[in-house]
Image (cartoon, helix red, strand yellow):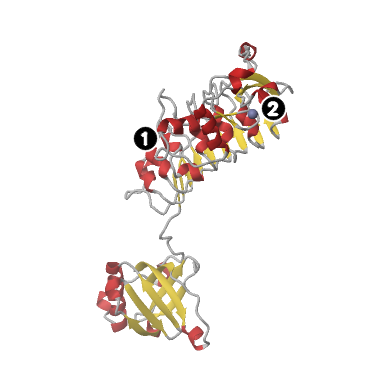
Amino acid sequence: MKLQCQVEVVNRKHFSLDVRPKNKYLKSTLALGKEPKDDKGYFILHFSTVNKQGTKYRVSDMKNVFVKFLNEGKVTLRFTEPCHDLCIRSEVIQLKSFMRLLQSCITGDSANVKLSELSSLGLVSKDMAPTKLTINNRSEFPAKGLPRTLESLYIVGLNLCNFRRDILLLNHLAILDLSKNEIEKIPPEFGRLPNLCELYLSNNSLGQKEDFDWRWLLGPGISKKLKLLDLCANKISMLPKDIWKLQNLVTFKIDFNKLERLPPTIGRIQTLRYFSVSNNNLVTLPCSLMQCRLETIDLSSNKFNSDTVGAKMANYTPWELCAHTLVHIAAKAVLRNKLYYAPNIVPYTLVELMDNANMCVCGKPVLNNARFIIKEFQLKDFFRVVVFDNNGDSSVGFECFFCSPKCYAR
Ligand SMILES: [Zn+2]
């Protein structure tokens, strides 16, 4: 019989040496077994996360059994050799049946005892709390739902159409791979996952619908922790303007989609280092991207060399660029000083205005959405490694916003 429990091993020798024991409770398995070729020889094997080989205690070496707190799920077994106390904490009913069997072993009431022999006991403790799970086949989904202890979960290539809602309960989840399925949407509650660092959603059907709901990506939990986002080979034609809320994102892959434009706010993700957006339909880039300290950018197979660049050269007067409303001036001050704002403090329209703020070529916020001009810049002047397919000429049209006539004139 095996008991899943928590065990603290107290070495009583340490007490006599007056050494303070530094033990603590560890997830363990206790196995009660029988010696081969010895009808009366019973033993307990103790496996734990740090002791995978197991320690063997003979039942005949047991000196005391303390069961005063059995009803609270706690007992202590005291052995003479080795002189250890096993302090056990477990679920009450399981612990009681374990203790009943142990009692039968001690009293020699062998009629009640049916135990496996030493050789047949697995010598590696079963991990009570799985942290990693790979599901290769639809039949492998655990009947009781996904274990809440999971830290990484891989459900790849099963052609799942629906997002599994039991994933929403996995508060420890750090890595989630749902690549190669047919998922079209993800519930907004997903954004509350507090520990997710890496999210792989490549080769799905996200963004297929016109009004694709992005709230799952910008929720309060996920936006603070997410470091890697892989959305390659979906059907995304637009990214949300508040994508900049992913304030820890380092790697962003969105190759093989249908993007025609990047949100001008994307440069507000200051942590971004690896950005790959090849095989889309981009014509220009937002100037805020120049403010990102990107290590690598992959822009191959887009539509940068199309003629629209020259056509959009607008001619603004400095007056149009420097005239601001009071609201814009105030909002700029809030953004520049990184003051905290939220819908419970200021009206929602202001939150929206500031959330959607663009960036000037100099990096300062620009509230005015309408006035931008397209200027050509060399990609290699801004990014360390550029993957681009224009034969050495890395000039691309950037949508440039301006915070002042001074920046405009530059
Ligand atoms: Zn400026």
Quadrant in the rendering for residue 69: bottom left
Residue that carries the numbered disc 1 in the rendered image: 162
Query: Ligand 1 is in which quadrant of the figure?
Result: top right
Percent across and percent down for residue 3 are 35, 68
Percent across and percent down for residue 219 are 43, 40
- Whether residue 183 is visible, yes or no, is no
Q: Earlier in the sequence, mark 1 or mark 2?
A: 1
For the N terminus, which image quadrant? bottom left
Depth check: give the residue in front, 12 or 213: 213
- Residue 23's place in the image compared with 229, above or below, is below
Q: Residue at x 37, y 73 (%)?
A: 88
Is ligand 1 within 8 Å of the beta carbon of the residue shown at mark 2? no
Depth check: give the residue in front, 51 or 217: 217
Furthest toward the bottom, the residue is 16
- Whether residue 120 is visible, yes or no, is yes
Within 10 angstroms of label 1, few (less than 14), some, or many (20 or more) residues? few
In terms of secondary structure, where does tag 2 sit? Answer: helix
Depth check: give the residue in front, 403 or 325: 325
- Looking at the rendered structure, the kind of residue marked 2 is Leu
Of the residues tagged 1 and 2, which is closer to the observer? 2
Relative side of 264 to 182, left or right: right
Question: Distance of mark 1 from mark 2, alpha carbons?
Answer: 40 Å
Residue that carries the numbered disc 2 in the rendered image: 379
Relative side of 115 to 332, left or right: left
- Looking at the rendered structure, the kind of residue marked 1 is Asn
